[in-house]
Amino acid sequence: MNISVVIPLLNEKESLKELCDSISEVMSTYGFSYEIILIDDGSNDQSWSEIEILSENNNEIKGIKFKRNYGKSQALHAGFLSSKGDVVFTMDADLQDDPKEIPAMYDMIVNDHFDLVSGWKKKRFDSILFKNIPSKIFNFAARVTSGIKLNDFNCGLKAYKKDVVKNINVYGEMHRYIPVLAKNEGYQKIGEKIVNHRPRKHGNTKFGPSRFLYGFLDLLTIWFISSFGKRPMHLFGSLGLIMLTTGFIFAGFLGYDKIFVNPFGRLITERPEFYISLVTMIIGSQFFSMGFIGELMLKNINKRPQYVIQKQTNL
């Protein structure tokens, strides 16, 4: 199979038929063998009924229904797990991503040997204040932190080699950072293509302003995991060593001063250096403990996907 198109969705019933028809038209025009995997992430409209109808009329359309809303990352994980295509695409279900971009991005993966190609919505049909400006700030921070020179980390339209999606673990809310996860697994050839971005036709966006706050927090998480995820003691042990050393220096100074310099002066407990020494040694011990706990957790980490599939079609 040439292409798998993985589409997570939440309450997008009105868009699904038009989206699947336009994808199928592109695939037919270029002679691609393909599958469309629609993941219903706990919709409370008639999205699943629409997916069942589409699947009955087209064997290339497949559906996965979650028992409740688990989030986009979990939906992508389920889609990646089920995908069979040599090149795997992700798209949003709101018709803002243009399926006509698929052939050129497929060519970049197959002929130019990119591991991952991310779309860049250079011209966006979104709110300037609530989406465009925060998105630029967020993408700048992501570039600086990750070292990956992409202009649009959060674009839903991306293409991957099959082995990329099979070897990355998309969890939590890390779908924004799939290029970073791929780079961490050794996939270095990451490209970008300017893509057509279209206005939303139906419904409203499912993401509010909080997505950017959570995005920056996730960025800190991915930076920490990239740098210290496999060796937490390197970070916490270093911080603990600095704090303990500081505490022992102050304690040594106090002891020397009390014994040899001013034995009849103020009590040690009346001097601020005593509390600095005490606090830094306690904090240093806590950092060491965090490092040890982190190392132990790595030995017992549970990598089970955090979602429950209720129904499937054509899989």
Image (tube, rainbow, N blue to C red):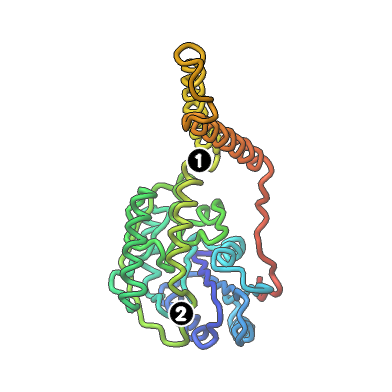
Looking at numbered disc 1 in the image, what kind of residue is underneath it? Phe
Residue 142 locus on image (x, y percent)? 38, 55
Image point 44% across, 68% down: which residue?
A: 156
Q: Residue reaching furthest top?
A: 260
Task: Assign a secondary structure to mark 2.
Answer: loop
Please give the residue where the numbered disc 2 appears in the rendered image.
Answer: 205
Q: Residue reaching furthest front?
A: 264
Looking at numbered disc 2 in the image, what kind of residue is underneath it? Thr
Residue 191 locus on image (x, y percent)? 35, 56
Residue 16 locus on image (x, y percent)? 52, 83
Label drawn at residue 228: 1
From the viewer's perspective, is residue 89 above or below residue 186?
below
Of mark 1 and mark 2, the one earlier in the sequence is 2
Give residue 179's quadrant in the image.
Answer: bottom left
**Residue 112 versus residue 9: which sits nearer the camera?**
9
* Left/right of residue 197 with respect to residue 57 in the rendered view: left
Image point 29% across, 69% down: which residue?
A: 122
Quarter placement of the C terminus = bottom right
Residue 25 locus on image (x, y percent)? 44, 80
Label drawn at residue 273: none
